[in-house]
């Protein structure tokens, strides 16, 4: 399914513009700059469809990308980005919260965590919301090319321990690098069953 053509279909800044596509959705959430947009490009090997940037705050709307007629990947704006204009920031953060807690076709949220930084309070806040809303989520550690393997393993164990009592937390914790491609086959495997057969 990740080889299907990736097509941008909609962007929403307010909840009434969220589209109804009738496809299962997988969303990518996490702090600004953690690598959400890059991961969608890397997962599908279709670079340039999703815009990325070295400056945090690149993605400012909830963006929907279809993979043929089987799956929809949803790129969410990041949170925890200090320089965004306050009002704009609140509006899109509210939309992200609403989306992850009340979206019908949302099958899974991939919560991306920078392997160097680990879980931050804002991540924990989002986890709490998803847990209450019974939104299934899994953890994806990003930018693993930057960290020594031992630190990575330690990070994964630490997160697994911290979250093990959450009912909607889906294992395993997957470690990826969009830069080297490491872990991407594993991540695809954990997601492929969510697509329309
Ligand atoms: P927002 O849209 O601002 O929320 O950010 P984002 O989470 O979508 O991040 P984005 O994909 O735009 O990437 C942010 C920066 O991280 C870019 O400079 C990427 O090149 C870099 N980056 C993404 N993935 C990796 C990775 O696997 N390894 C390394 N070293 N850098 C990465
Ligand atoms: Mg982005």
Image (cartoon, grey):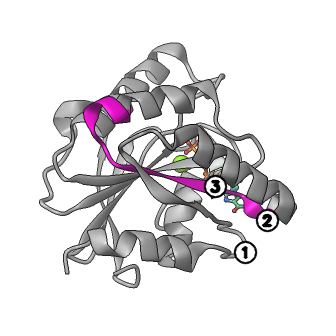
**Residue 51 visible, this orientation:** no
Asked whether the beta carbons under mark 1 and mark 2 sit within 8 Å of each other, the answer is: yes
Q: Which mark is residue 145?
A: 2
Foreground mark, 3 or 1, reads 3
Q: Secondary structure at mark 2?
A: helix
Q: Quadrant of the C terminus?
A: bottom left
Magenta stretch holds residue 136: yes
Asked whether the beta carbons under mark 2 and mark 3 sit within 8 Å of each other, the answer is: no
Q: Is mark 2 within 8 Å of ligand 1?
A: yes
The Cα atoms of the two marked residues, 1 and 2, are separated by: 7 Å
Q: Residue at x 71, y 69 (%)?
A: 179
Q: Residue at x 35, y 75 (%)?
A: 192
Residue 194 sits above or below residue 112 on the image: below
The disc, 3 or 1, on the residue closer to the chain's N-terminal end is: 3
Which residue does the numbered mark 1 point to in the structure image? Answer: 180
Foreground mark, 2 or 3, reads 3
Residue 174 sits above or below residue 61 on the image: below
Residue 18 position within the rendered picture, expressed as x and y whole percent measured from the top left:
21, 42
Q: Secondary structure at mark 1?
A: loop
Magenta stretch holds residue 68: no
Residue 192 sits above or below residue 62 on the image: below
Residue 188 sits above or below residue 8 on the image: below
Q: Residue at x 69, y 45 (%)?
A: 158
Dividing the picture into quarters, in which one does residue 12 lie?
Answer: top left
Magenta span covers which residues?
130-145
Residue 181 position within the rendered picture, expressed as x and y whole percent measured from the top left:
66, 76
The disc, 1 or 2, on the residue closer to the chain's N-terminal end is: 2
Q: Which mark is residue 141?
A: 3
């Amino acid at each position: 399914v990740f080889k299907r053509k990736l097509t941008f279909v909609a962007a929403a800044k307010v909840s009434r513009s969220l589209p109804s596509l009738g496809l299962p959705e997988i969303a990518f959430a996490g702090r600004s700059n953690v690598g959400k947009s890059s991961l969608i490009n890397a997962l599908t090997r279709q670079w340039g469809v999703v815009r990325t940037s070295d400056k945090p705050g690149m993605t400012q709307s909830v963006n929907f990308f279809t993979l043929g007629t089987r799956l929809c990947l949803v790129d969410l704006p990041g949170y925890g980005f200090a320089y965004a204009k306050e009002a704009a920031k609140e509006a899109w953060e509210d939309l992200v919260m609403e989306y992850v807690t009340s979206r019908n076709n949302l099958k899974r949220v991939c919560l991306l965590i920078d392997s160097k930084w680990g879980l931050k309070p804002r991540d924990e806040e989002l986890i709490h919301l998803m847990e209450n809303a019974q939104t299934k989520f899994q953890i994806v550690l990003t930018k693993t090319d930057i960290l020594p393997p031992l630190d990575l393993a330690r990070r994964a164990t630490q997160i697994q321990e911290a979250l093990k009592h959450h009912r909607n937390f889906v294992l395993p914790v997957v470690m990826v690098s969009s830069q080297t491609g490491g872990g991407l086959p594993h991540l695809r495997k954990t997601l492929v069953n969510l697509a329309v057969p």
